[in-house]
C-alpha cells in the first residue's frame, strides 16, 4: 500500500473538458505541471494563463517529469493513450469512454494489471450530491434490495452550440452512435447499487428529419437511445441518453422496500424517498423530500462543476494514487459501463436482440474478445463494421455543411 502525502504532479491532455481538471488540481492535493493538445493556438493560450509547460506531441508530453496523466482527449481514443501512459509509468485518470472497442477494453484491463499503477475512470455523475446520498441510503438498507432503476442524461442544444463543440465532419460527436455515450446514465445506478450490467438490449430513436437541432448539424447518428440492462443481481435498469428536449439528469432506484429518486422539478438536487405505509417505521413519513449535503468536503464540492462531480473524481483519483488502493471507479467498472454502450449498438442494429456485457476481470473471458475491433469510426471502418445510425448511412445537407463551416471558422477551425 502506497502511503505518501507528496503532491501528485499531473499532466492533462485536452484543453476542452480538460480545463476543468487543470483548474481543480490544487484543491485535491495535485499539482498541474504540463498540458498537451494538438490544437496549438488554444494550448499555448491555456499554458500561458496557467503558467505550465505545453506539448503538442503526446510522446514528448509523457517524457515530462510527472506522476499522473488525465486524459480528456477524444472520446474514442482514450484506451491507446491510457495504455501508453501506463507503460510510461504514469497513473491514469481517463475521461469517458474507457475504450472504443471490446478489443481495446481487453488491452486496457491487461495493461492496468501489468503496470501496477492507479487507473481511475473519471465518471463524475455518480458523485452528484443526490447520487452520493442514494448510495449512503442504499447501503444502510433503507429501500431493501435493488430491483429496477433508471438513469437519464438528456442533453439537447441548438445547432450552433452542437456544431461549436464538434469541429470537423469526422469529429466523434458527429458520428458516435446514440448508445455509446451511456456512462453518465448507467454509472450512477451501478455506483448506488454496486451492480454491473450483464446483458443489454439497445434501442435507438432514429434521426429526426423534422428536428433542426439534428438537420442543421453534420451529425449522422440518431436522436437518442434507450438501453435496457439486466444487472448481475437480476435487477433491470433503463438508461436513456441523447438530445431529446427536456434537459436533465435523473436517477431512480426501486428496492423491494422503497423508492428513491432525485426530483424532476424545482431544485433537481433534492431527493425524494418513498416508503409504503405498511412497511415504514411508526412515526416516519411515507414521503420525504430534502436537499442532502455531500458526505465530505461539502463547501469545495458545491463550487465544482457537474453538481460537484468534478471535485470528487479528482479527489478520489488523488486518494487512490496516494494510498495505492484502487478507486471505486476502477478500470473494470469503467470498461463495464463503456462496453455496455458498444454492445447496445450491436443489439440496436440487430433488432434489439440481447447482447452480453462480458466481464473483463477474467482473462478467460477476455481472450474471446481480444481481437474485437467492431467500430463505426470513419477512420477505422472496414467491411462488416456498422453505420452510425440505425437508418444506415446519413449524409449532412449542403446547408448544414455551410453553417458548420461558418461556426467552425468562428472557433478558429478551418479543416474539413
Ligand atoms: N464527464 C463529463 O462531464 C464530460 C464533459 C465533457 C466532455 N467529456 C469528455 O471529455 C473528452 C473531451 O471532450 P471535449 O468536450 O473536451 O471535446 P473534444 O473531444 O473535442 O476535445 C478533445 C481535445 O483533445 C485534443 N486532442 C485530440 N487528439 C489529441 C492528441 N492526439 N494529442 C493531444 N491532444 C489531442 C483536441 O484537440 C481537443 O482539444 C471526451 O471524452 C468527452 O466524452 C466529459
Image (cartoon, rainbow, N blue to C red):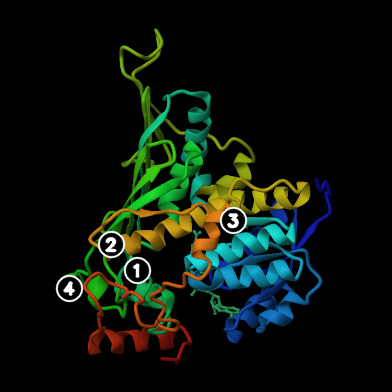
Residue 363, numbered label: 3
Give the mark nearer the N terminus: 1 vs 4: 1
Spatial CA distance of label 3 from label 2 is 27 Å
Q: Position of residue 235 (x, y in %)?
A: 37, 37
Q: Is residue 97 visible?
A: no
Provide the residue designation for mark 4. Answer: 209
Spatial CA distance of label 3 from label 4 is 45 Å
Residue 177, numbered label: 1
Residue at 54% x, 48% y is: 308
Label 1 neighbourhood size at 10 Å, few (<14), some (14-19), many (20+)? many
Q: Secondary structure at mark 4?
A: loop
Residue at 70% x, 66% y is: 86
Q: Secondary structure at mark 2?
A: helix
- Residue found farthest to the top: 282
- Residue found farthest to the left: 210
Q: Mark 2 near mark 1, Cβ–Cβ under 8 Å?
A: yes
Q: Mark 3 near mark 2, Cβ–Cβ under 8 Å?
A: no
Name the image quarter holding the C terminus. bottom left
Provide the residue designation for mark 2. Answer: 348
Q: Position of residue 140 (x, y in %)?
A: 52, 24
Q: Is residue 343 above or below residue 376?
A: above
Give the mark nearer the N terminus: 2 vs 1: 1
Spatial CA distance of label 1 from label 4 is 17 Å
Q: Is residue 100 above or below residue 171?
A: above
Name the image quarter holding the N terminus. top right
Left/right of residue 188 with respect to residue 177 in the rendered view: right
Spatial CA distance of label 4 from label 2 is 20 Å
Q: Nearer the viewer, mark 1 or mark 4?
A: 1
Amino acid at each position: 500500500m502506497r502511503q505518501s502525502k507528496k503532491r501528485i504532479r499531473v499532466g492533462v491532455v485536452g484543453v476542452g473538458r480538460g480545463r476543468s481538471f487543470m483548474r481543480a488540481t490544487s484543491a485535491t492535493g495535485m499539482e498541474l505541471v504540463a498540458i498537451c493538445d494538438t490544437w496549438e493556438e488554444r494550448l499555448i493560450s491555456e499554458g500561458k494563463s496557467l503558467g505550465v509547460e505545453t506539448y503538442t506531441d503526446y510522446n514528448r508530453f509523457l517524457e515530462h517529469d510527472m506522476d499522473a496523466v488525465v486524459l480528456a482527449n477524444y472520446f474514442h481514443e482514450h484506451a491507446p493513450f491510457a495504455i501508453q501512459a501506463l507503460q510510461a509509468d504514469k497513473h491514469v485518470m481517463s475521461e469517458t469512454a474507457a475504450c472504443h472497442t471490446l478489443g481495446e477494453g481487453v488491452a486496457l484491463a491487461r495493461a492496468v494489471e501489468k503496470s501496477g499503477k492507479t487507473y481511475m475512470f473519471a465518471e463524475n455523475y455518480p458523485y452528484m450530491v443526490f447520487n452520493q446520498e442514494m448510495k449512503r441510503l442504499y447501503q444502510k438498507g433503507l429501500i431493501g434490495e435493488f430491483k429496477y432503476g433508471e438513469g437519464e442524461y438528456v442533453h439537447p442544444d441548438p445547432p450552433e452550440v452542437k456544431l461549436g463543440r464538434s469541429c470537423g465532419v469526422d469529429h466523434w460527436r458527429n458520428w458516435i452512435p446514440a448508445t455509446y455515450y451511456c456512462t453518465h446514465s448507467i454509472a450512477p445506478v451501478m455506483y448506488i447499487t454496486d451492480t454491473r450490467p450483464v446483458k443489454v438490449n439497445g434501442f435507438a430513436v432514429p434521426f429526426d428529419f423534422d428536428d433542426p437541432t439534428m438537420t442543421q448539424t453534420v451529425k449522422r447518428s440518431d436522436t437518442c437511445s434507450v438501453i435496457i440492462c439486466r444487472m448481475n443481481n437480476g435487477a433491470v435498469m433503463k438508461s436513456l441518453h441523447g438530445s431529446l428536449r427536456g434537459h436533465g439528469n435523473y436517477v431512480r432506484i426501486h428496492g423491494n422496500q422503497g423508492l428513491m429518486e432525485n426530483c424532476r422539478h424545482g431544485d433537481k438536487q433534492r431527493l425524494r424517498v418513498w416508503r409504503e405505509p405498511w412497511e415504514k417505521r411508526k412515526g416516519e413519513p411515507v414521503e420525504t423530500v430534502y436537499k442532502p449535503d455531500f458526505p465530505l468536503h461539502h463547501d469545495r464540492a458545491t463550487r465544482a462543476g457537474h453538481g460537484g462531480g468534478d471535485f470528487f473524481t479528482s479527489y478520489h483519483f488523488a486518494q487512490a494514487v496516494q494510498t495505492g488502493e484502487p478507486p471505486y471507479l476502477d478500470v473494470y467498472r469503467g470498461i463495464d459501463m463503456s462496453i455496455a454502450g458498444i454492445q447496445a449498438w450491436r443489439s440496436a442494429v440487430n433488432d434489439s436482440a440481447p447482447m452480453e456485457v462480458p466481464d473483463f476481470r477474467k482473462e478467460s473471458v477476455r481472450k474471446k474478445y481480444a481481437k474485437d475491433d467492431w467500430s463505426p469510426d470513419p477512420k477505422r471502418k472496414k467491411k462488416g463494421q456498422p453505420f452510425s445510425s440505425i437508418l444506415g448511412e446519413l449524409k449532412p445537407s449542403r446547408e448544414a455543411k455551410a453553417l458548420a463551416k461558418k461556426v467552425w471558422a468562428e472557433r478558429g477551425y478551418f479543416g474539413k
